[in-house]
Image (cartoon, grey):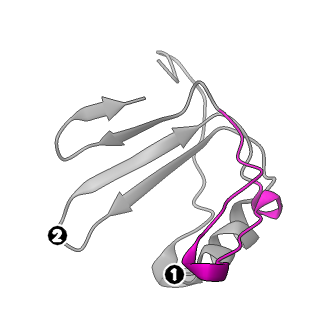
Amino acid sequence: MIFGPGSTKKFELIYKASVHGFKGSAFHERCDKLGSPTICFVLSETGNVFGGYVSIDWDGSLRDIDFNNGLGRLSGLREDNNAFIFSLTHKTMHN
């Protein structure tokens, strides 16, 4: 359980694509290095609600993207053994 009974955790909206922009750079400008944990919620165009949880900071500066010859490479990815994705629509969780 992330937050138990009696938890005093407060949530703050720090990024909303329809307000701040749909580019990954807009997300990282607002979300990188703010501390952890982070919970993301997504409402799809078809009405599905899903999201994810990470227990470490977002850090877009670790990206090294090279799309030469049609190949993409991401380096600097960090493992988070506590991370998971979920669907509120389907009431499922996957780690």
| Residue 18, horizontal then vertical, whole percent | 46, 82
In this view of the protein, which residue sits in the foreground, 3 or 36? 36
For disc 2, the neighbor class at 10 Å (few under 14, some 14 to 19, many from 20) is: few
Q: Residue at x 67, y 59 (%)?
A: 74
Q: Which mark is residue 22?
A: 1
Secondary structure found at label 2: loop
For disc 1, the neighbor class at 10 Å (few under 14, some 14 to 19, many from 20) is: few
Q: Residue at x 32, y 51 (%)?
A: 50
Q: Residue at x 67, y 34 (%)?
A: 79
Q: Amino acid at mark 2?
A: Thr
Left or right: 35 in relation to 50: right
Q: Magenta residues, as a range?
A: 59-79
Secondary structure found at label 1: loop
Marks counted in the figure total 2
* Magenta-drawn stretch, dominant element (helix, strand or loop): loop
Q: Amino acid at mark 1?
A: Phe
